[in-house]
Amino acid sequence: MRIAIVDYGMGNISSIVSALRYIGVDDIIISNNPEELAGADKLILPGVGNYANAAKKVVNLNLKEILHKLVVVEKKPILGICLGMQILGLSSTESGFNQGLGFVDGCVDKFEGCNLKIPHVGYNQVSPNQSSRLYDGLSNSPDFYFTHSFKMMSESDIGESMTCYGNSFIASFEVGNIAGVQFHPELSQTNGLKLLQNFVERF
């Protein structure tokens, strides 16, 4: 099992590598090279920072084309983490309107509510979709570590699991071979390790 972590300069990569090694994944590559990405069995798209910058880097590194080929055409499994999850969607309003990869019908917007402390940081409970593969073997309300200022919503069924901060928003989604989590499983202790293992074994 070879897992490629897509390197576009905005990822919390070392923590993801450590978590993957902990659950027994030894064949890990960190790359933005199309041939190396194509040689992997599964992909992880990390992300920390500003959506507009991330979208620009994805385009400048010619990742949009290769990721579309591998994920949409060839159906290679991918897991987007935090900003990486958001980039898998249609668009975001962070720093103006910016288009994402468009793999799932999800749009990212700022949190609403005058009493909310932004960013949303810390552990929060998730209500998993009943058909979820990511949460298999976890409790009905597992908690994960979040740190983000923008949230994703969708008008379509994208196999979403929800959490609440002011209002409900998408904590994760699963559409065929495509999955995304708003939280950081690599920083979420036992629950996060189990979720990563589920992605490795069940996608």
Image: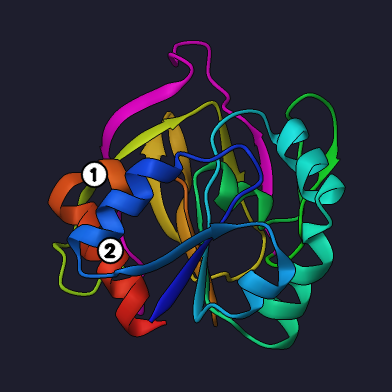
Relative height, residue 102 to residue 112 (above, below):
below
Relative depth, front residue between 109 and 5: 5
- Dot 1 lies on which element? loop
Please indicate whether residue 99 sits to the left or right of residue 153 in the image. Answer: right
Which of disc 1 and disc 2 is earlier in sequence?
1
Relative depth, front residue between 185 and 109: 185
Q: Are marks 2 and 1 in contact (CB under 8 Å)?
A: yes
- Mark 1 Cα-neighbour bin, 10 Å: few <14, some 14–19, many ≥20: some
Relative height, residue 160 to residue 137 (above, below):
above
Q: x, y (%) of residue 78?
A: 54, 70
Q: Amino acid at mark 2?
A: Leu
On the question of residue 183 being in view, the answer is: no
Q: x, y (%) of residue 80?
A: 53, 57
**Label annotation for residue 27:** none
Q: Is residue 110 magenta?
A: yes
Mark 2 lies on residue: 195
Mark 1 lies on residue: 188
Q: Amino acid at mark 1?
A: Ser
Residue at 27% x, 41% y: name it: 187
Q: x, y (%) of residue 5?
A: 51, 58
Residue at 43% x, 13% y: name it: 117
Residue at 15% x, 73% y: name it: 137
Q: How many marks?
A: 2
Question: Rounded to the nearest whole Å, what is the CA distance between mark 2 and mark 1?
Answer: 10 Å
Q: x, y (%) of residue 184?
A: 37, 44
| Colouring of the image | rainbow
Segment colored magenta: 105-133
